[in-house]
Image (cartoon, rainbow, N blue to C red):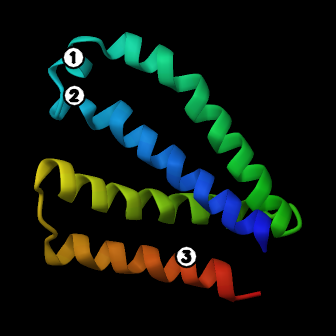
Amino acid sequence: MRSLFLGMALFFIGQVLIWFQTNGQFISKWIKDHPLLVSLCTGTLISYIFIKATALVAGYYGGALWSARLIGFAMGIISFTFLTWLLTGESLTAKTSTCVALSFIILSIQIFWK
């Protein structure tokens, strides 16, 4: 169970870093003016985090990649929702709220359905 939660934490951290890498241009002039530098400085670290997260989660599920992919996806939606609301002030529409709820359902299915 430890590897599952560590993998989930790494997926969350990776998704947070991806958010800043791709959406930082909307909150920082420096990031907007230096996209190549941002990608070069963060890309390898983010890739490594996702590789380790996938290994941990897939290992917990006996090598099943679908579980790792769906958990990574759900962690991305959850982190994106929070960061976009917090840093850009975008509110949740009914459609977006439904998608976020579905992400929590996907995450719950992957964690609790054996």
Name the amino acid type tagged 3.
Leu
Q: Mark 1 highlights which residue?
A: 30
Quadrant (top left, top right, bottom left, bottom right) of the N terminus: bottom right
Circle 3 crowding by C-alpha within 10 Å: few under 14, some 14–19, many from 20 = many
User: From the viewer's perspective, is 64 left or right of 33?
Assistant: right
Please, what is the three-letter code of the amino acid marked with disc 1? Answer: Trp
- Please give the name of the residue rendered at 67% of the width and 87% of the height, measured from the top-left corner: 112
User: Which quarter of the picture shows residue 69?
Assistant: bottom right
Q: On the image, numbered disc 2 is attached to which residue?
A: 25
Residue sitting at x 70%, y 88%: 113
Instruction: Report crowding for label 1: few under 14, some 14 to 19, many 20 or more residues within 10 A (C-alpha).
Output: few
> Eyeballing the image, is 5 above or below 11?
below
Tag 2: amino acid: Gln
For mark 2, does the 10 Å Cα neighbourhood hold few (<14), some (14 to 19), or many (20 or more) residues? some
Depth order, front residue of 89/100: 89
Q: Earlier in the sequence, mark 3 or mark 2?
A: 2
Q: Nearer the viewer, residue 89 or 93?
A: 89
Q: Is residue 41 above or below residue 47?
A: above
Q: Position of residue 27 (x, y in %)?
A: 16, 34
**Which numbered disc flags the more N-terminal residue, 1 or 2?**
2
Residue position marked by numbered label 3 in the rendering: 107
Q: What's the residue at 42%, 46% (across, down)?
A: 16
Distance between mark 3 and mark 1 Cα atoms: 35 Å
